[in-house]
Image (cartoon, rainbow, N blue to C red):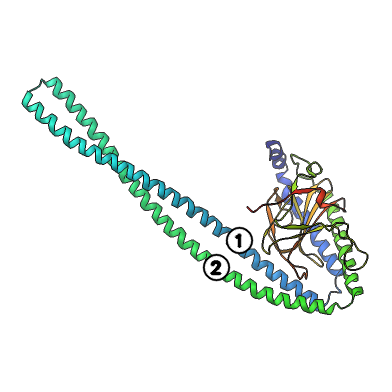
């Protein structure tokens, strides 16, 4: 971000807390309204939502633990590289010191004998003694450097030992968290199976689909009105000028469903699905502000980012959400992990782009495949 953008952001610093409080209050009121509209949810639907939110908490902790493990691994790699370098340097310094000691012994012994036998004049003796002092000083410096390297290597080994132990502790913690997550996911899957069995008719499925679509449109329109009252952070490049240059938000096969008919009733898809690995990172496609981050029926754990000028991107069915309402996020920043929340049978990220509430084909915006980081 350029200095001009940062300066503009800084000048608004005093308003930031007030704006954030205002935005969160708007979202809170909106959630209450949605909750009333969805009061007809069955007990099974409520149980699924509760189970998915528990999984989200567990998955968020697991993601944090994995990030810490990555940091420890990187630190360990750097420490081992440094240790290897210092060991090589120590061998060189020891060889130099060995050569100096041998030369000092041989040359020094011969010169002292010559001085005595030849009875050279005092000026010559003084010059040679000055040379010996210089030679001894250089040798002392060499010994000092070797000792310093030995101490550094000892410190490196101690730090490697501590980091290795911390890494092992975190890996054990990660294993426990994964086991806990698997148990909770199994319980959630049982609930989803019961819920799907409960929705036996296509008419009921279509009714739910239409309600979910209506609620999402209502949410986005309300968000736009709330955000219109809050000054946007200036960016170097407006979102509209990034069309066709963006990366897809997750790594995986993109199912280009936009504007295709859904399997139930005459309802069209408003976005695409990216078939990605469960727990894989979900990235913000561009700079923006988190406008919504919560569970929504039909979309599960969903994050909506406001990119300014009426543009928003939507990321649904996540396993967990990693950013809160009001947070500024940068392009490529991880905002969630891929999941199947919202009662899905399979894992995948639901992705939309909207302008002034109207869905826009994501394939016209995102052209670049995301690679592993």
Measure the C-alpha gap from mark 1 to mark 2: 11 Å
Residue 4 has which mark? none
Q: Quadrant of residue 101?
A: top left
Residue at 85% across, 77% down: 199
Is 51 placed above or below 226 here? below
How many residues crowd around disc 2 within 10 Å: few (fewer than 14), some, or many (20 or more)? some
Question: Residue 268, image x and y in percent?
Answer: 89, 61
306 on left or right of 118: right
Is 337 placed above or below 95 here? below
20 on left or right of 153: right
How many residues crowd around disc 1 within 10 Å: few (fewer than 14), some, or many (20 or more)? few
SS of the residue at dot 1?
Answer: helix
Question: Residue 187, image x and y in percent?
Answer: 70, 77
Say which of 159 and 39 sits in front: 159
Residue at 68% across, 73% down: 185
- Kindly identify which residue carries mark 1: 64
- Kindly identify which residue carries mark 2: 173
Question: Residue 27, image x and y in percent?
Answer: 80, 59
For the N terminus, which image quadrant? Answer: top right
């Amino acid at each position: 971000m350029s200095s001009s953008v940062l300066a503009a952001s800084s000048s608004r610093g005093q308003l930031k807390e007030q704006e954030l409080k205002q935005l969160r209050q708007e979202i809170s009121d909106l959630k209450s309204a949605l909750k009333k509209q969805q009061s007809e949810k069955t007990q099974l639907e409520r149980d699924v939502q509760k189970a998915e939110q528990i999984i989200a908490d567990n998955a968020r902790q697991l993601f944090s633990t994995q990030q810490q493990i990555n940091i420890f691994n990187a630190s360990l790699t750097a420490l081992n590289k440094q240790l290897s370098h210092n060991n090589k340097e120590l061998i060189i310094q020891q060889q130099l010191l060995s050569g100096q000691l041998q030369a000092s012994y041989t040359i020094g012994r011969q010169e002292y004998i010559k001085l005595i036998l030849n009875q050279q004049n005092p000026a010559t003796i003084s010059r040679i003694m000055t040379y010996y002092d210089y030679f001894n000083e250089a040798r002392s410096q060499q010994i000092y450097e070797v000792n310093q390297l030995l101490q550094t290597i000892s410190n490196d080994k101690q730090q490697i030992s501590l980091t290795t132990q911390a890494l092992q502790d975190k890996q054990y913690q990660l294993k426990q968290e994964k086991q806990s997550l698997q148990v909770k996911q199994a319980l959630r899957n049982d609930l989803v199976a019961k819920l799907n069995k409960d929705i036996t008719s296509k008419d009921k499925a279509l009714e739910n689909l239409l309600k979910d679509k209506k609620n999402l449109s209502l949410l986005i329109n309300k968000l736009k009105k709330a955000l219109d009252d809050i000054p946007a952070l200036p960016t170097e490049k407006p979102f509209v000028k990034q069309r066709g240059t963006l990366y897809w938000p997750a790594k995986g096969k993109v199912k280009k469903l936009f504007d295709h008919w859904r399997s139930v009733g005459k309802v069209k898809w408003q976005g695409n699905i990216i078939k990605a690995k469960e727990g894989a990172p979900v990235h913000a496609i561009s700079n923006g502000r988190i406008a919504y981050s919560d569970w929504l029926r039909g979309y599960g754990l969903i994050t909506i980012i406001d990119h300014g000028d009426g543009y928003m991107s939507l990321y649904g069915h996540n396993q967990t959400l990693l950013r809160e309402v009001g947070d500024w996020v940068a392009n490529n920043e991880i905002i969630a992990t891929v999941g199947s929340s919202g009662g899905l049978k399979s894992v995948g990220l639901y992705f939309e782009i909207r302008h002034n509430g109207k869905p826009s084909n994501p394939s016209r915006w995102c052209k670049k495949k995301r690679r592993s980081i």
